[in-house]
Amino acid sequence: MVVKATAPRVPDSYLKLVKRFPLIHIRDQAHLDEAIELLGELLRQERDQGTQEYLDVLTDLVAAYEDEHIPMPNVLRG
């Protein structure tokens, strides 16, 4: 017997945000600035499941870009 997995239903709020700001790798500083602006907007509002899932992925994309392109200062002093 073959069991087919079904894809989870994607909430409309998630799809609306993807259309507004697609979830792709951050390309440059201007793209990062747009992503951070949207993150701030989403953090200030009440979120449903779709919006929260979008926020989680966008946060991961921003963190990945920052980890690769923005050096962290050495705050440890010996």
Image (cartoon, rainbow, N blue to C red):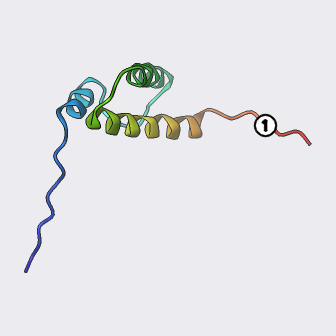
Residue 55 figure quarter: top left
What element does badge 1 sit on? Answer: loop
Q: Position of residue 47 (x, y in %)?
A: 32, 29
Compared with 25, 8 (above or below) is below
35 horizontally vs 20: left or right: right
Q: Looking at the image, which residue is at 43% across and 33% down?
A: 26
| Closer to us: 77 or 72 | 77
Q: Position of residue 38 (x, y in %)?
A: 39, 21
Quarter of the picture containing the N terminus is bottom left
Which residue has dot 1 on it?
74
Q: Looking at the image, which residue is at 15% across and 63% down?
A: 5
Q: Looking at the image, which residue is at 38% across and 24% down?
A: 42
Compared with 23, 8 (above or below) is below
Compared with 69, 34 (above or below) is above
- Give the residue at the far front of this rendering: 46
Residue 71 figure quarter: top right
Q: Looking at the image, which residue is at 21% across and 33% down?
A: 15
Q: Position of residue 12 (x, y in %)?
A: 17, 32
25 horizontally vs 70: left or right: left
User: Looking at the picture, which amino acid does disc 1 mark?
Assistant: Asn
Q: Position of residue 56 (x, y in %)?
A: 40, 39
Assess disc 1: are there few (<14), some (14-19) or many (≥20) residues with their C-alpha within 10 Å of its C-alpha. few
- Give the residue at the far bottom of this rendering: 1
